[in-house]
Image (cartoon, rainbow, N blue to C red):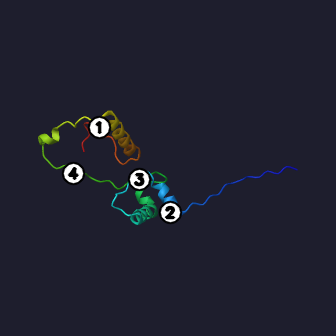
Amino acid sequence: MKFSFDIYQISAQDPIEELLDESREGQFSTTLTSKQKLSLLKMLRKNRPEFAIGEEPLGKIRGHDIELYLHGERPYLPMLRKHPYPESLETRKEIKKDINGLLDMDVIRRIGHNEIL
């Protein structure tokens, strides 16, 4: 007679540790105390549907569009027409990585050069 057993490993994690694990990639103001950070994390988790979609990271929000209004009339001030100063290769790579992350989370989107905003 053969017997088969399925072995499952069940682990319990402290809810506070679980919150902290979820927020490892997040950045918090250095002025927040640990208690304030924890309170913020609890609020974000409790209201996750408002701050994320499904299991996506916080920040992927639909239905809460914002409108940005640029102040100034054409022709724009010379300061606004200036080309950005060049960045180092490492800095450009980091900027591109951050922008791609925001694109992946649908926080921002690409627009065409002739798209009317």
- Residue that label 4 marks: 69
**Residue type at the position of mark 2:** Ile
Residue tagged by mark 2? 16
Are circles 3 and 2 on residues that touch, CB within 8 Å?
Answer: no
Q: CA distance from mark 3 to mark 4?
A: 28 Å
Q: CA distance from mark 4 to mark 2?
A: 40 Å
**Towards the viewer: 81 or 108:** 81
Judged by depth in the image, the label closer to the viewer, 3 or 4, is 3
Is residue 102 placed above or below 46 in the rendered structure? above
Alpha carbon of mark 2 to alpha carbon of mark 1: how far? 44 Å
Position of residue 96 in the picture relative to residue 77 (left or right): right
What kind of element bears circle 1?
A: loop
| 87 up-or-down from 117: above or below | above
Question: Which dot marks residue 112?
Answer: 1
Which circle's residue, 3 or 1, is located before the other in the chain? 3
Q: Given contact means CB atoms under 8 Å apart, are the residues at marks 1 and 4 in contact?
A: no
Q: Amino acid at mark 4?
A: Tyr
Asked whether, in this view, residue 115 is left or right of residue 32, the answer is: left
| Residue 15 drawn above or below residue 4 | below
The residue labelled by disc 3 is: 26
Q: Amino acid at mark 1?
A: Gly
The three-letter amino acid code for the residue at tag 3 is Gly
Residue ID at (60%, 60%): 12
Q: Nearer the viewer, residue 97 or 111?
A: 97
